[in-house]
Image (cartoon, rainbow, N blue to C red):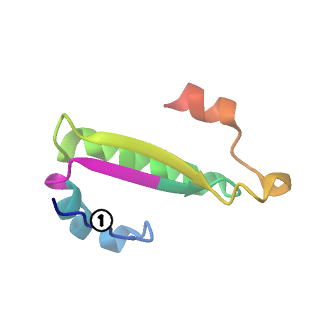
């Protein structure tokens, strides 16, 4: 079994390269920053792209990081549940 991990900063210039990586993937983890709402919306966009560019059976996970900065949280759990 081979596992590859790619950290792409979410910048548009890396989009074509990233699509190549998840085209043959069995699972994808998309991480967003809970203290930046725009980070969540960008992550949501990536999840939507997976519907078109990845295998229909791909396992997807959305993970919020920086949970130790609760006082700076911009993305509430309710928003995530309703949006996805």
Q: Looking at this rendering, what residue extends furthest in the right direction?
A: 71
Image location (x, y in percent) of residue 22: 22, 56
Front-most of residues 2 and 50: 2
Examine the image and state in which quarter residue 33 appears.
Answer: bottom right
Please name whichever residue, 28 or 72, is drawn nearer the observer in this view of the structure: 28
Q: Residue 33 magenta-drawn?
A: no
Camera-side residue of 31 and 27: 27
Q: What residue appears at the point 52 percent right and 49 percent down from the top-left corner?
A: 63
Please give the name of the residue rendered at 28% of the width and 48% of the height, measured from the top-left corner: 27
**Is 28 on the left or on the right of 36, as rendered?**
left
4 left or right, relative to 8: left
Taking 57 as reference, is 66 left or right?
right
Name the image quarter holding residue 79.
top right
The x and y percentages for residue 73 are 76, 51
The N terminus lies in quadrant: bottom left
Q: How many marks?
A: 1
> Relative to 5, is 83 above or below?
above
10 Å neighbourhood of mark 1: few (<14), some, or many (≥20)? few
Residue furthest toward the front?
Answer: 1
Q: Secondary structure at mark 1?
A: helix
Q: Based on the picture, tell me whether residue 29 belongs to the magenta stretch.
A: yes
Q: Which residues are magenta?
A: 23-30
Residue 34: x and y in percent read 66, 53
Which residue corresponds to the image point at 45% horizontal and 71% vertical from the top-left?
Answer: 9
Q: Is residue 57 left or right of residue 6?
A: left
Q: Which residue is mark 1?
A: 15
Vertical side of 8 occupied by 65: above or below: above
Tell me the quarter of the picture where residue 4 sits.
bottom left
x and y, in percent, of residue 80 in the image: 59, 35
Question: Residue at (74%, 49%) from the top-left corner?
Answer: 74
């Amino acid at each position: 079994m081979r596992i590859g991990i790619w950290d792409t900063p979410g910048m548009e210039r890396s989009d074509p390269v990233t699509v190549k990586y998840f085209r043959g993937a069995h699972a994808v983890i998309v991480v967003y920053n809970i203290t930046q709402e725009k980070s969540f919306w960008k992550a949501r966009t990536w999840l939507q792209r997976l519907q078109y560019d990845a295998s229909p059976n791909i396992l997807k996970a959305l993970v919020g990081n920086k949970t130790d900065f609760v006082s700076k949280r911009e993305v509430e759990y309710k928003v995530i549940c309703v949006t996805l």
